Amino acid sequence: MIILKFNGIKKKYLKVVRGRKRPTWAPVERNLMSVTGMPGAYLNNNNIQVRIIEVPVVILSDSFSDLQKVKEDMAEWLIHDEAKELVFEDEPDRVYFALVHGELDLVELVGVGSGVITFICPDPFKYGKEQTESFTSDMLTLPYNGTAPASPIFELEVLKPVTFAMVQNQFSEYQMIGTPIDVDTQVVDKTTPIIFEYGQSLDDWYTPSGDWTGTFATTENAIVIGKWGTGKEWHGAALMKEITPLDDYEIELYVYLRTERDDQTFRVSTNYYDENMNELGMLRLWDKTTNQTRKVVEARMGPYVGDDINYLISHRNYNIQGQRVWGGIIRVRKEGNKFTFYAARVTQGGRHVSALTKTYTDVNKEYAGKLKYVRFDIANFGNTNKPNEVRIEHIKVNKLAQLNVDQTPYIANPGDKITLNNFKKEILLNGEDVKELKDFGGSFFNLHKGDNQLVVHPSNSFKATAKWRNRYR
């Protein structure tokens, strides 16, 4: 008997019986078209079908009662909505991306059960271990020896400001975002940092009016609560800052929050105002319930005038229930009379997930005032329990320039990371989807058998690496 590993986990109680059915290659379907008077048929097209793997197993436990608990553990381990890695002990250098399909009908005897687990692979190929190679002088010769074309991932660490990023091969295939510079084009930086606060310059802020009895403290790279203060309703700490008025701007709040109990409440907000202290809008993450754990994102136009009024993002479209931890970005961008609100959780790997974008066109210019004041706060309600962890990773304010027809903007700056993921068909900038920057002629492409000559443009602008798995039929 051998062992299988699924989603990176193996269980001692499950053993695979030898003689399982594992297809030799991904199944191929030939679609034929018969023509009257013609012997045989035309080959219309070829389709590679879903791979099905039937795995006879034996489950070992101490008793019949314990076997029932093992089955519950198996359900938690094996049942997912997305394909996970499946590896067999006798084929350790090959990976399948599989889902459990159908039922597991066990024949049970005392503490032993036997049956067949059926896995399906929507992606029917097998994969080798992930490999990584670095580009040298903007070039990389990548020898590929899989039996089916593979989809590489290119990661570009930006070394200097760029208006475009491109990777191409010798087969006239390429992927590109942004716009190369023409000789008669002026290059501009569309984004100018005004505030980048992560707790290192809080003395430059002041406490706004209101009943703010708490205080902030700082870690090496975040803003946290020093003292919560007291109050019958929302109470905590707040700070405010005045800036040179901005016509077009971007405000970003990066929050991390962890709650372990249903009766914990919190509010992390930023409110922003024009030159006359008229409220232009609000961004917030909060939970004001005491009978469930949830993370609600809110983004509002203008001041509060009633529940669900002028909210582009709210409990109606961003209400995550039962999740203990939420760390991510809430952002507003004003360009002319267009406001774009964005919220996304950021994974430990830096990828944006659970993302939501909403836009609002201020036709009547109700919120056209120049941004002059920015406030942020962290609060707790009454005597409810406080969150286990809460911090503001940063609050950013950027000035956005309006571009002329003959101007090309930088799309990335030093320290940014561009990911061209041919495997998942993703284009990311610092983990955020930026497919809107994709060049019309660019496409996701594969590695081909033999040597692949890869080049990254513009030259001397990136520390580039390629990642891939050999793919096998």
Image (cartoon, grey):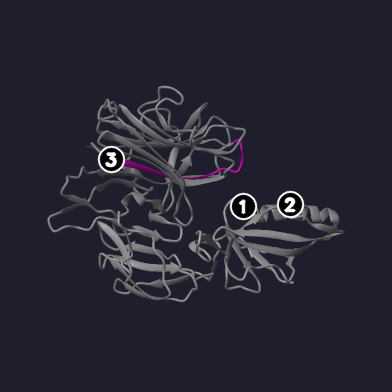
The image shows residue 324, relative to residue 70, as above or below, that is above
Residue 322 in sight here: yes
Q: Is residue 184 left or right of residue 305?
A: left
Amino acid at pointer 1: His
Residue 153: which quarter of the image? bottom left
Circle 2 SS class = helix
How far apart are the alpha carbons under marks 3 and 2? 52 Å
Q: Where is residue 64 in the image (x, y as percent from the top left)?
A: 85, 55
Q: Which residue lies furthest to the right in this view?
A: 110
Quadrant, the C terminus: bottom right
Number of numbered callouts drawn: 3
Amino acid at pointer 2: Glu
Q: Position of residue 48 (x, y in %)?
A: 53, 62
Residue for badge 3: 249
- Depth order, front residue of 59/190: 59
- Depth order, front residue of 374/402: 402
| Marker disc for residue 10 | none
| Marker disc for residue 80 | 1
Residue for badge 2: 72
How far apart are the alpha carbons under marks 3 and 1? 41 Å
Amino acid at pointer 3: Tyr
Label 2 Cα crowd, 10 Å radius (few <14 / some 14-19 / many 20+): few
Q: Position of residue 298 (x, y in %)?
A: 44, 34
| 261 falls in the magenta region | yes
Q: Which numbered disc flags the more N-terminal residue, 3 or 1?
A: 1
What segment carries the magenta color? 249-263
Mark 3 and 2 residues: CB-CB less than 8 Å, in contact? no
- Depth order, front residue of 149/418: 149
Q: Of circles 3 and 1, which is in front?
A: 1
Q: Where is residue 359 in the image (x, y as percent from the top left)?
A: 36, 36
Q: Of circles 1 and 2, which is in front?
A: 1
Residue 30: which quarter of the image? bottom right
